[in-house]
Amino acid sequence: DADVVVRAERLVPRLPTAALRRAVVYRLEMRTVLAALRRRQRGEPAPGADMRWGYGRWTRTIARSWQEPGLGVERAFPWVRDAAEQLRAGDALALESLLMRELWTMTGRHGAGHAFDFTAVALYALRYQLVERRVAYDAEAATARFRRLVDQGFAAFAARGPA
């Protein structure tokens, strides 16, 4: 965790646009909330003030509100109670789906007003990753994609002719 925090603190300020910085910070803060939920689920105590365990402006609030169901961040992250419940239930797929929907929505909001600029392309790439991950969860779609890639590979190989 500390290594990720150090890298983020070094790299986030270097992102070229405010919208991209906001999108990346939100994603890192989501990870911090999720890390806190997982730590609490395992029965770990609240992180100490000297620990570098999460990124963003909510780490102290979360540590102070460790026993609250929403970790004191429900206004910023309205999905936190649902995520905690899915963790308790052991429903990893529902939790992942919730987080992916939230990231999709927030990435769209951060991209509002950007068209055909660097920020739009970078946020599109972030959204594309979400789609790619989601498709990977669908066994039929993954199999079809694999077959398509294999067929393309063999077609390219056959087109080269004998060695």
Image (spheres, rainbow, N blue to C red):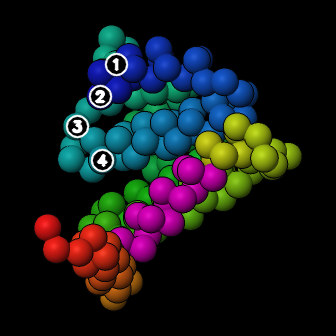
Structural distance between the alpha carbons of marks 1 and 2: 7 Å
Q: Amino acid at mark 3?
A: Glu
Q: Which mark is residue 38?
A: 4
Structural distance between the alpha carbons of marks 3 and 4: 9 Å
Relative vertical location of residue 56 with respect to residue 86 in this rendering, above or below:
above
Point 23% across, 75% down: residue: 161
Quick one: label 3, few (<14), some, or many (20+) residues within 10 Å? few
Q: Quadrant of residue 40?
A: top left
Q: Which mark is residue 1?
A: 2
In this view, the mark in front (1 or 3): 1
Structural distance between the alpha carbons of marks 4 and 2: 13 Å
Residue sitting nearer the eye, 74 or 161: 161
Q: Amino acid at mark 4?
A: Arg
| Local SS, label 1 | loop
Point 49% across, 20% down: residue: 11
In this view, the mark in front (3 or 4): 4
Residue with the mark numbered 3: 44
Label 1 close to label 3 by CB (< 8 Å): no
Residue 111, horizontal then vertical, whole percent: 74, 47
